[in-house]
Image (cartoon, helix red, strand yellow):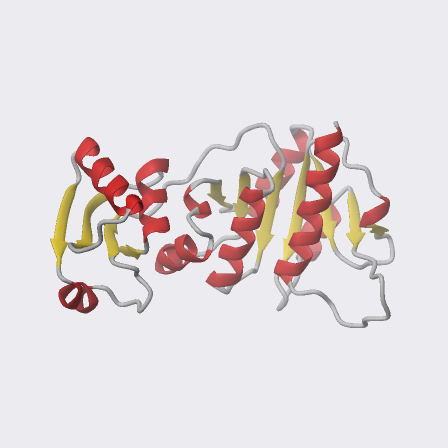
Amino acid sequence: MIIEGAIAVKSALLNHKRTVEKVYIRKDKKTKDFNYIRKLLYTMNIEKIEMPKEDLDLLLAGKSHGGIGAVVSQRKDDEFDEGDIFYLDGIEDPFNLGYSMRTLYALGVKNVLLSTRDYSMMEAQLLKSSAGAYDMLNVKVAQDPLKEIEEYKNQGYYLYALYRGEQAKDIFDVTFENKVLFMLGGEKRGISSQLLSLSDQQLYISYGSDFRNALNACGALDVVVTLLRNQRKKI
């Protein structure tokens, strides 16, 4: 697999979530960032191939590679730490998923559980759209989401589902005191009824206007993780 862009390549080198086999660099790029990457490659004994812009453009598929690309392995699954967990179910667009990961990492969430799917074909896009956060997070793919989330519940996690049901509470009225696992669904199918039944509390986002349409998954996640970050700072 080939990833592109200085941020994605640097993240792959620094976070050790995948093997970096070789790196292609535009030979006339001598910026501070590129020289730092060259130094990393030398220290880590990774093959570096310098080439002119014309050859690099033919090798790399994207139009915004910025003068660098790398051949890398697929990402390894991680173990989670004791922090909060976000389960992202059905966010299928790699750019939206990457944006969500960027927000989660930036605001202090490290553990991301993904619904069952083959992510190998979108890893390059995830690295780019997440600004490298995909390789900074602890990421696991749930082979049996219901079983795995139930295990976290047994470990003391309080389960919240973002779902506007009859029993749902306004998220702005909730205090997140325990370690929590948030379940957020994509726009197409939302959260499954089985997972909803497993949740300890359903939440909805109340609006400050008469807007009648739902937020998309990225917008909803921004609200949730911002509230969580604000409350965690006060604990």
Residue positioned 71% across, 52% down in the render: 223
Q: Would residue 29 be found to the left or right of residue 190 on screen?
A: left
Quadrant of the snapshot with the C terminus? top right
Residue positioned 25% across, 55% down in the render: 68
Residue 16, can we see it? no
Furthest residue in direction front, as rendered: 31
Quadrant of the snapshot with the N terminus? bottom left
**Looking at the image, which is closer to me, 159 or 47?**
47
Residue positioned 48% across, 40% down in the render: 137
- The answer to which image quadrant residue 153 occupies is top right
**How many discs appear?**
0
**Looking at the image, which is closer to me, 102 or 160?**
102
- The answer to which image quadrant residue 205 occupies is bottom right
- The picture places residue 13, in percent across and down from the top left corner, at 30, 40
- The picture places residue 43, in percent across and down from the top left corner, at 20, 31
**Looking at the image, which is closer to me, 80 or 230?**
230
- The picture places residue 214, in percent across and down from the top left corner, at 73, 67
- The picture places residue 145, in percent across and down from the top left corner, at 57, 47
Residue 14, can we see it? yes
